[in-house]
């Protein structure tokens, strides 16, 4: 199941903003949480990938450097974001489809 689709040109920076809220629209705290991301061979351990977090507001942004996107083939890729909360609850918060297209500017 895909929750989110993003199109990007080959060699561009990938930016994925995420906001987690409860059923009433209140932010879900990320204090003490671990965030994991996987896209092909790119994971949270990859150089050139980072997460900017605002734990109190339940938001984070995943950024993947253009050099990592350049290393991928022009193709469609599935990616996932999983949060392990301080309480021990593990939740996949986003399953996405990334469509990489050829950029005509070299």
Image: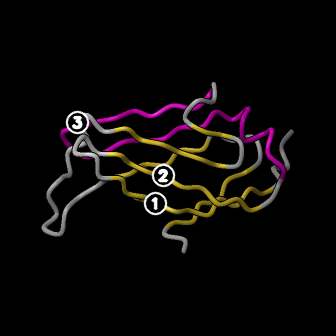
Furthest-top residue in this view: 47
Q: Is residue 79 above or below residue 53?
A: below
Asked if marks 2 and 3 touch (Cβ < 8 Å), the reply is: no
The structure residue drawn at horizontal position 48% and vertical position 52%, both measured from the top left corner, is 81
Of the 4 image quadrants, the one containing the C terminus is: top right
Residue picked out by circle 1: 94
Q: Which span is picked out in magenta?
A: 48-73
Q: How far apart are labels 1 and 2 at the CA level?
A: 5 Å
Residue picked out by circle 2: 81
The picture places residue 25, in percent across and down from the top left corner, at: 16, 63
SS at badge 2: strand
Residue picked out by circle 3: 31
Task: Please tell me how crowded label 2 is: few (under 14), some (14-19), or many (20+) other residues with Cα within 10 Å.
Answer: some
Residue 9 falls left or right of residue 54: right
Colour scheme:
secondary structure
Residue 56 falls left or right of residue 6: left
Q: Which of marks 2 and 3 is nearer the N terminus?
A: 3
């Amino acid at each position: 199941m895909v929750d989110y689709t993003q199109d990007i040109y080959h060699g561009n920076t990938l930016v994925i903003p995420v906001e987690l809220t409860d059923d009433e629209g209140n932010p879900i705290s990320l204090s003490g949480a671990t965030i994991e991301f996987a896209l092909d061979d790119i994971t949270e351990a990859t150089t050139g990938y980072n997460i900017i977090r605002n734990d109190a507001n339940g938001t984070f942004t995943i950024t993947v450097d253009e050099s990592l996107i350049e290393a991928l083939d022009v193709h469609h890729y599935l990616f996932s974001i999983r949060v392990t909360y301080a309480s021990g609850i593990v939740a996949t918060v986003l399953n996405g489809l990334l469509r990489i297209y050829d950029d005509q500017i070299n």
